[in-house]
Image (cartoon, rainbow, N blue to C red):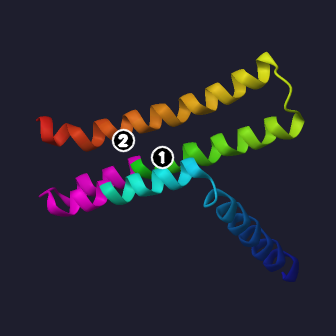
């Protein structure tokens, strides 16, 4: 039982270490600012709680994609900084995942205004 509690505490510590790293990443900070702007505007827009929940979940997907992209980039950089097609491919795919998440967020946010 004691080992399980220690494992849970260690997992929490590792997660907070990852969050500290993400909060130093320029792109992650930009997306946090984007979220603040979107939700500030959303505060003044009359929308349903369900729409706000969906918007929040779409925003969380952006943050998750950015976190995973940052992890991919850190791993590729750990392997080496020399130019290699597979390294470029891995970084580009991670970036594409963030882009797709941002497009999804934009659609979720703009669609009620367009309907």
Q: Relative to 72, is 14 above or below?
A: below
Residue at the limit of the structure toward the bottom, as seen here: 2
Q: Mark 1 or mark 2: which comes first in sequence?
A: 1
**Going by the image, does 23 lie left or right of 62?**
right
Q: Secondary structure at mark 1?
A: helix
Q: Relative to 3, is 100 above or below?
A: above
User: Which image quadrant for residue 97?
Assistant: top right
**Most foreground residue, 70 or 2:** 70
Q: Are marks 1 and 2 in contact (CB under 8 Å)?
A: yes
Q: Secondary structure at mark 2?
A: helix
Residue position marked by numbered label 1 in the rendering: 61
User: Which image quadrant for residue 80?
Assistant: top right
The residue drawn where x is 81% and y is 38% is 77
Question: What whole-number distance in Å separates the C-alpha atoms at marks 1 and 2?
Answer: 8 Å
**Going by the image, does 102 lie left or right of 115?**
right
**Going by the image, does 72 lie left or right of 107?**
right
Residue position marked by numbered label 2 in the rendering: 105
Q: Which mark is residue 44?
A: none
The question of residue 3 being in magenta is answered with no
Residue 92 place in picture, x, y as percent: 63, 26
Decide: few, some or many residues near mark 1? Use Cα within 10 Å; few <14, some 14-19, many ≥20.
Answer: some
For the N terminus, the quadrant is bottom right
Q: How many marks?
A: 2
For the C terminus, the quadrant is top left
**Most foreground residue, 57 or 89:** 89
- Part of the protein shown in magenta: 38-58
């Amino acid at each position: 039982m004691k080992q399980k509690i220690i494992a849970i505490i260690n997992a929490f510590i590792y997660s907070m270490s990852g969050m500290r790293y993400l909060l130093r990443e320029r792109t992650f900070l930009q997306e946090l600012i984007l979220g603040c702007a979107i939700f500030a505007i959303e505060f003044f827009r009359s929308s349903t709680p369900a729409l706000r929940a969906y918007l929040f979940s779409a925003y969380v997907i952006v943050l998750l994609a950015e976190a995973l992209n940052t992890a991919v980039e850190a791993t590729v950089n750990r392997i080496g900084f020399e130019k290699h097609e597979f390294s470029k491919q891995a970084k580009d795919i991670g970036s594409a995942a963030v882009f797709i998440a941002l497009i999804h967020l934009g659609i979720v946010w703009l669609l009620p205004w367009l309907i």
